[in-house]
Image: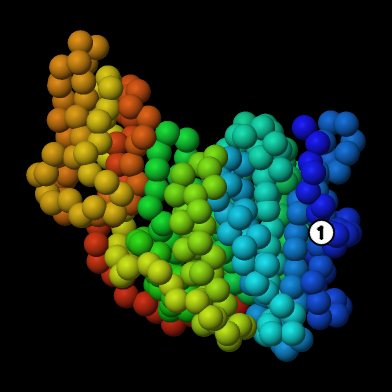
Amino acid sequence: MRSTQKLPRQIPATEVQRLELTDLAPGRYRFRLALAEDATSQRVCVPVQVVKGHAPGPVVGITAALHGNEVNGLPVIHRLFRRLHASELAGTVVGVGPLNVPGYLRNKREFSDGKDLNRVFPGSPTGNESSVYAHAIVERLLRNFDVLFDLHTASFGRSNSLYIRADMTQAQTAHLARVIRPQIIVHNRADGTLRAAAEHLGIHALTVEIGNPQRAQETLVLSSSVGLREALEHLGMTKSDEESPQAETVECSHSYWLYTDGGGLLEVFPHLTERVARGQPVAQLLNEWGEVHRVYEAPEDGIVIGKATNPVASSGARILHLGVVGSVPERAQPPRDSAPC
Ligand SMILES: [Zn+2]
């Protein structure tokens, strides 16, 4: 079918091998950042948009679709950038996505070698495919940032609330998490992730989990982009003209998944963000005749961060992601570490 709409003129994108922000004049830019070559010797380029403000300020990076099928973050970035203007901005905002281009093209979470890209950071220039790519992300992109928001969703067969994972012992990081006002915040430190690589470089880094994979969920996209604008305002970069529509945020000291010890058709009872009490039935398994043969209870009081949506369950299937409500003590921010990752 041929498009009948007249489209606005596009800003051309420049291909670069490395994102260099220091010498850029204030303004709006589009780049294609080359991170690798594919098997047809073509460069694998990631779309990067930049708005550099007229006033000085921090560099905030927002990355999306590091897991290739987690696409809610892309319209979040697009919406945010439509409302950013260099004349009204202090500092620089960089929007990157899809970051895992090979996964995105195949509607897959994983990279082209089947590896989970968000488990191989900081990567290595002499490693395998995913490791080389992760290393290029760190060296050619990540090092520019003072703050990182890495946008994700649930994995296939699960659904998520709008929640943030962050090291809540870091005062500045914790404050950024709170001004976004997600439904839930979980204190969490994770090795091998882009967030961990960023933290190693002294970057304030937060993982924002936005709903479900392979979907663009308008309400969560709106909430997330408003929340990120609040974060930019908190950093002194913009003046926000929107009110964050979220309700109170629930903070969790930690979280974990519950798994089945048998197989069958899984039914999970509580909805996302629902509070559950210790001993409350939260799920059941039906056998092949439709009879209940397992019932699972909450092992302690908590809140439902995510849950299985795929009813087909074998032994060890995920049931729900339980957050244990509570906060962790903050400590002062250590000085920024400029050592190589
Ligand atoms: Zn993800």
For the point 16% across and 25% down, which residue is it? 294
Above-or-below relation of 300 to 113: below
For the point 20% across and 54% down, which residue is it? 275
Residue 310 spot, x, y in % from top left: 37, 30
Residue 274 spot, x, y in % from top left: 24, 52
> In the rendered view, does 65 fall on the left or right side of 248?
right
Question: Could you tell me which quadrant the C terminus lies in?
Answer: bottom right
Q: Residues within 10 Å of mark 1 (few under 14, many from 20)?
A: few
Above-or-below relation of 302 to 159: below
> In the rendered view, does 136 fall on the left or right side of 208?
right
Display colour scheme:
rainbow
For the point 59% across and 71% down, which residue is it? 147
Determine the residue located farthest toward the bottom in the rendered image: 55
> In the rendered view, does 192 fall on the left or right side of 162?
right
Determine the residue located farthest toward the front in the rendered image: 4
For the point 66% across and 32% down, which residue is it? 106
Determine the residue located farthest toward the left in the rendered image: 279
What kind of element bears circle 1? Answer: loop
Residue 29 position by quadrant: bottom right
Of 212 and 204, the residue lying toward us: 212
Residue 326 position by quadrant: bottom left
Dot 1 corresponds to which residue? 8
Residue 196 spot, x, y in % from top left: 54, 59
Residue 263 position by quadrant: top left
Of 81 and 3, the residue lying toward us: 3
Question: Could you tell me which quadrant the N terminus lies in?
Answer: top right
Residue 165, can we see it?
no
Above-or-below relation of 253 to 334: above
Of 167 and 182, the residue lying toward us: 182
| Amino acid marked by disc 1 | Pro
Residue 316 spot, x, y in % from top left: 32, 28
